[in-house]
Amino acid sequence: MIEMGRSLLFPSLRSGNATGVLLRAWTAFKSTSWATVASGFMEPVLYLLAMGMGMGALVGDVVGPDGNPMSYAAYIAPALLTTSAMNGAVYESTWNVFFKLRFGKIYQVMLQTPMGPMDIALGEVGWALLRGLAYGVAFMVVAFVMGLVTSLWALLMVPVALLVALGFAGFGMGITSYLTNFRQMDVVGFVMLPMFLFSATLYPITVYPEWIQWVVKVMPLWHGVELMRGLSIGYVTWGSLGHLAYFLVMAGVGLTLMTLRLRKLFLR
Amino acid sequence: MTASPTVIHAADLMKVYGKLRAVDGINFEVREGESFGLLGPNGAGKSTTMRMIGGTLIRDGGTLEVLGLDPDKDGPLIRANLGVVPQQDYLDEELRVAENLTMYGRYFGLPYSYLRPKVAELLEFAKLTDRAKANVEELSGGMKRRLVIARGLINDPRILLLDEPTTGLDPQARHIVWDQLYRLKERGVTLIVTTHFMDEAEQLCERLIVMDNGQIKAEGRPMALIREYSTPEVLELRFGVGRNEELLPQLEGIGERHELLADRLLLYVRDGDAALSEVARRGITPLTSLVRRSSLEDVFLRLTGRSLIE
Ligand SMILES: Nc1ncnc2c1ncn2[C@@H]1O[C@H](COP(=O)(O)OP(=O)(O)O)[C@@H](O)[C@H]1O
Ligand SMILES: [Mg+2]
């Protein structure tokens, strides 16, 4: 007989053993094709190389957040870092969670053990965070090697990448919980690509009419990009705090949504 | 002899899906060390009941106590001492055979020092030691089922829930699984088995409930149920398509009652051979005839007017 203590918080939803989810994810991850994993990381790096060096040669210097000129590569690098963290978190929390939920029946098996829905949710968010963080850090190293990191403030980009990942992971899982087939999953890509292209990643949003600018500002990626770009050159303002707040709220809403969906998702 | 403690107690247990009452107010009790069966056709509510016991499905009414706890409130704590063999195997295809057991043990938070010998022991028990490193897809249906049963034992559970343990297996594979379950029974593990096979219920269950449409139709030991709801023997007669009903009036008075099925006629009798002689004496010649013992199938037919397997 197993002696197990009752969890203090939410004893009906968790055993406190969320690490089981991480272990399962890691074990399966080790045997997935590295191409899949690498592509999530390579995409922004390729953008940096192609756009930063290619377009950069064409455009020359651009105006940075603080009004001073900066190289085009340095301008887009923080945006791509943010995108990297977002991609890692979104991929895990949507596609992988969707597959484990609807096809692999991984969670059904976990739920036969002491693990509860909340262990699963926390474990998956943790895993998505790790992936987002790994992408973020790897990209940071590339940017550093290319001489695009110029301020100590830039070190803060790592925890911010984690926060960006948290916001997207919680939200992604919440959304995924509503989806039941692959066709609906396409919606994720349908939102992600335009968001990447329009969110001041490759050029300032001031080129757009005002109403488009507002749409972009409502979406999360722009806030991440603005925050990161400022940090990369040590230009921190009240606006930065606003962007930070956006992600804190997004993470909070995402995690709440996910928790509310848990019973519906797993205990029906 | 003192009675063993009650490990599961259900009172007016209920689960509703929209308008459908999947489990419609059932009452039962299971004692420690017992092998208890839920017998009923597809859709009777057996799996739903099993899932409520493990706390992975929230009930809509009634009370349920498992190992003294409420599954809706203490699911994780209950499941720590529960073994679950679900209707579908749900093996992890991204992991190898032995890894499936180890990983499952990790979900329980069990340490590797415990799991290493335990996994070896369970592979031996499931006769899968030589397949430890195989991919799950390479296993036959019977092997997968044995692995799933072994997986359910990783935590030395006090109660093992088996949802249709042998559905979809060929006869030989079924017997190997049954053998596995007898050994557990001897070790004193409490078994809860759902099945729609009456022979499985007779083989494995000391006591069972007969379920239909979410309700309990009868409860008792298999032999007692057969004695109560059926005659000792059954005479099965076939007269060919459409003719069974036609001949019914001529058989009047033979046996205590009859059931008319699509392909045959069942006469419930005390003595099958004597009844068959009486049929011959009346000059009636069926295409085929068969005398057999009454089974739980007959109990179900009597209680619901339908066969277990449709
Ligand atoms: N998630 C669900 N949503 C709606 N109906 C369900 C669900 N699960 C089971 N049912 C219905 O509940 C009834 C009982 O199902 P189940 O417990 O699986 O039966 P059994 O295991 O005895 O075959 C069936 O009619 C089934 O269709
Ligand atoms: Mg079932």
Image (cartoon, helix red, strand yellow):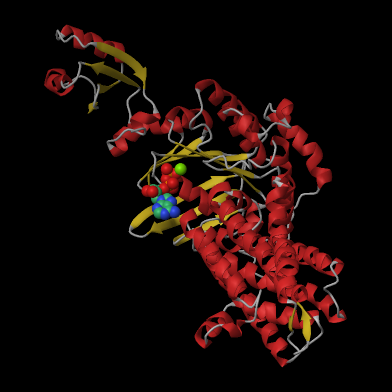
Q: Residue at x 36, y 34 (%)?
A: B308
**Residue A134 as seen in the image, left or right of residue B295:** right
Above or below residue B24? Residue A203 is: below
The x, y position of residue B208, in whole percent, is 47, 39
Any part of residue A122 in sight: no
Q: Residue at x 40, y 33 (%)?
A: B225
Name the residue furthest bottom: A238
Q: Residue at x 33, y 59 (%)?
A: B19
Above or below residue B37? Residue A202 is: below
Q: Quadrant of residue B13?
A: bottom left
The x, y position of residue B95, in whole percent, is 69, 41
For the residue pair A88 and B117, the one nearer the viewer reads as A88
The x, y position of residue B119, in whole percent, is 75, 37
For the residue pair A266 and B43, the one nearer the viewer reads as A266
Name the residue furthest front: A58
Above or below residue A6? Residue A108 is: above
**Residue A22 as seen in the image, left or right of residue A195:** right
For the residue pair B69 and A72, the one nearer the viewer reads as A72
Total marks placed: 0
Any part of residue A158 in sight: yes
For the residue pair B203 and B1, the one nearer the viewer reads as B203
Q: Quadrant of residue A256?
A: bottom right
**Residue A104 as seen in the image, left or right of residue B111:** left
Q: Residue at x 57, y 45 (%)?
A: B31
